[in-house]
Amino acid sequence: MVRLAAIARRFYLEGRSKVEIAEEFGLSRFKIARDLETARTSGIVRIDIRLPARLAGEQSERLREAYGLRRAIVVDAMEDPLETRRALGSVAARLLAEIVRPDDVLGLAWSRGLQAMGAEMVELPRCTVVQLNGVLSEHTEAGGSVETVRRVARLSGGAAYPIYAPLILPDAATARTLRADPGIAAAFGHFDRLSTAVVAIGGWGEHNSTVYPALTPQARDRYTALGVSAEMSARLFDSEGRRVHTDLDERIISIGTDQLREVPEVVAVAGAGDEAKARAIGAVLKSGLVSTLVTDGDVAKVLLAGS
């Protein structure tokens, strides 16, 4: 028992390899492996897996299974929505530090949650960072999408491809002209090379969407009549996750859903909203475009109840 404890201490606490331990004790590494197993089954070693208090492990796994996701990370919702948003951003920043590889091409959309993610990010492998869509005039202040892309690129030491253009244009001709601009075309040229895209999901209403308030009342009514209930990067979806094609498609500067579908990893950071926002997130998940979801406990409850 003393030998088992000594072997376990070297392996689990000191981080020594089985080969090193085998040499010290004059045993084979296979005997060391059997001793480590015996140490666990006999109770000498107890492995206690704990997530940080604000992460909900069981809820995360249930959500992943319910929507067929590669990953789901659920953060406990807090009383202050701003604190929840910051927690989501922090978790998303840590996730990117784990999954982004050197020389990847990372695409970033914009939302307040993604802005928080950019602010919380402290490390990232060297990669190219590309903006996925234009900006809304009310969000061009410091810390908007352009600044987030540039900050993340500086952090990684890679190239930045921001988009200095509005998200929504008055007509298709203006949008086509802007897409031909060399700087914007350079960003668009990286869409087919994306390794990871980080997006936000919006609902369909004044307080749950960045797109809805930017539209005319007539356009809102027209799209609502077509069944729109959610949006992602200004692409519209109905409650079953089907794309709703409208004239807006030709008037926006944004990555397309067909391009997103080809991206190996699409991470949606979406939460800190009401039940309508949660249903919108569920609608976009049904589209199959999202592989990883970072959300909060309140959203997860609604999604699991409706799955």
Image: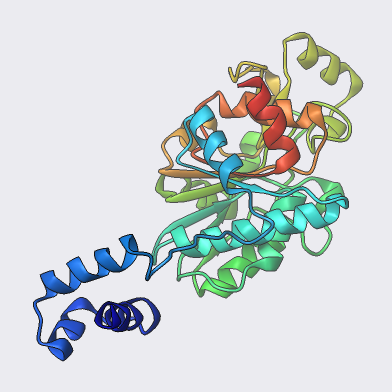
**Residue drawn at 67 percent across, 24 percent down:** 305
Q: Residue reaching furthest bottom?
A: 24
User: Of all residues shown, which one is farthest toward the top?
Assistant: 225
Coordinates of residue 188 in the picture (x, y in percent): 52, 46
Q: Where is residue 58 in the image (x, y as percent from the top left)?
A: 57, 43
- Taking the image as drawn, is residue 87 in sight? yes
What is the image's colouring? rainbow
Q: Which quadrant, please, contains the C terminus? A: top right
State whether residue 202 is above or below residue 31: above
Tell me where residue 51 appears, x and y as whole percent: 58, 59
| Quadrant in the rendering for residue 237 | top right
Task: Give me the residue at 64% from left, 28% from top.
Answer: 304
Task: Please state the total of marks drawn on the protein image.
Answer: 0
Q: Which picture quadrant has residue 2?
A: bottom left
187 sits to left or right of 102: right
Which one is in front, 226 or 146? Answer: 226
Q: Is residue 31 above or below residue 50?
A: below
Residue 251 visible in this rendered orientation of the protein: no
Measured as percent of width and height from the top left, residue 245 is found at: 63, 17
Give the side of residue 212 with respect to residue 114, left or right.
right
Looking at this view, is 192 or 99 the one in front?
A: 99
The one nearer the camera, 20 or 292, is 20
Of the 4 image quadrants, the one containing the N terminus is bottom left
Q: Which residue is drawn at 47% across and 50% down?
A: 196
Up/down of 207 relative to 97, above or below: above
For residue 204, side relative to residue 255 (left or right): right
In this rendering, the answer to whether 264 lies above or below 225 is: below
